[in-house]
Amino acid sequence: MKKGNMLGTILALILVFTISGTAFAAKTIRVSLCNSETHPQSLGLQLFKTLVEEQTNGELQVNLYYNSQLGGERESVEQVKNGLLEMATASAGPMTTFNARFMVLDIPYAFNDYNEAWMVMDGPAAQALFRSCEEVGLKGLAWMENGFRHTTNSLKAINTIKDFEGLKIRTMEAPMHMETFKALGANPTPVPWTELYMVLQQRVVDGQENPLANIWEVKMYEVQKYTSLDGHIYDPMPLVANLDWFKELTEEQQRIVQTAAVLGQNYSRSVNAAREQYIVELLEKKGMQVNAVSEAEKEKMRNATQAGIVGKIKEKTDPKFVDLWLSNIEQARKDVRAGL
């Protein structure tokens, strides 16, 4: 072979390998999370990572960034919306900044238990909520578990609605959360998640509200004395992706991502539900006093808050969607009772 031909062959082979390498180069999915590696939503997303990487034969690689490494919840969703990040999870409160319909998740005492909540989150109203995210450039994939939110404080156990009176309670930066605690008689103060422990430690507020997983994770037993299981709001964490990025995936990759997200969601739910009693026991061993609020008192709290909050939400978003959401909750309860 002539020297010139050999050189041409080598260059052609290099070009082929370069093109092939580009065609099969792995796409990276960066996911921003605000919690630690052992939080239920994080464990669900670890399953998501495993399934996506295995089923795409490594064409998609998932990198999970815990503890708000890439920014807080609102900042992370903003990055996803603007195409600077592929995916993020966030509580419903910060999501209302981008889509006011998420305020339906801030309706207090909407669900009696996890089964009711999951039936609605997997139903038509929640899917319509996800579809509406496409109007702002987001693709809703699944509802990672966070759990029912409860109230802690350093002054007294909350057993009745009167016990809220005068308590300075940290809430998320979510208007309807603040309105709920005002209606209960407390003084709400919005504080970002990343600043919460310091605010409690410095006694800037008397207490705060969060799911049990978060109460344990950030060691609130070091700065709080009482945990009252009032379950005022069910707070799933939507996993959202940049819509344009998602559409660039092949149909098969989209199917794999969507299926893995739902399986990760279900895993996070199971983990959270199974560990909550353990968390209560651990909090008590650390010296916290944990009390369950009675159903009768929860009903009083519901009566004091729910109708007013629903009215305020209808002023800020599509009232027909709010009615659809409420009808889905009622349908779930009817289905549970059907045939009994």
Image: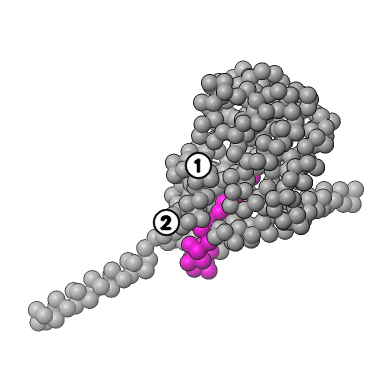
User: Does 99 appear above or below 285?
Assistant: below
Is 177 within the magenta? no
Ranked by sequence position, the earlier of labels 1 and 2 is 2
Q: Residue at x 14, y 76 (%)?
A: 7
Q: Residue tagged by mark 1?
A: 72
Mark 1 to mark 2 CA distance (whole Å)? 21 Å
Circle 1 Cα neighbour tier, 10 Å, few/some/many (<14 / 14–19 / ≥20) = many
Which residue was labeled with disc 2? 28
The residues colored magenta run: 236-254
- The x, y position of residue 163, in whole percent, is 75, 23
Colouring:
one colour
- 25 left or right, relative to 54: left
- Say whether residue 154 is visible: yes
Tell me what residue is drawn at x 60 percent, y 34 percent: 190
Question: At x 53% / y 69%, what residue is drawn?
Answer: 251
- Residue furthest to the right: 340
The amino acid beneath tag 2 is Thr
Quadrant of image for the N terminus: bottom left
Image depth: mark 1 or mark 2 in front: 1
- Residue 219 shown left or right of residue 116 in the figure: left
Taking depth in this image into account, of 148 and 170 the one nearest to the observer is: 170
Residue under the image location 65 percent in, 25 percent down: 168
Q: Position of residue 257 (x, y in %)?
A: 53, 59
In-front residue for pair 121/136: 136
Q: Secondary structure at mark 1?
A: loop
Report x, y in % for residue 268. Answer: 60, 44
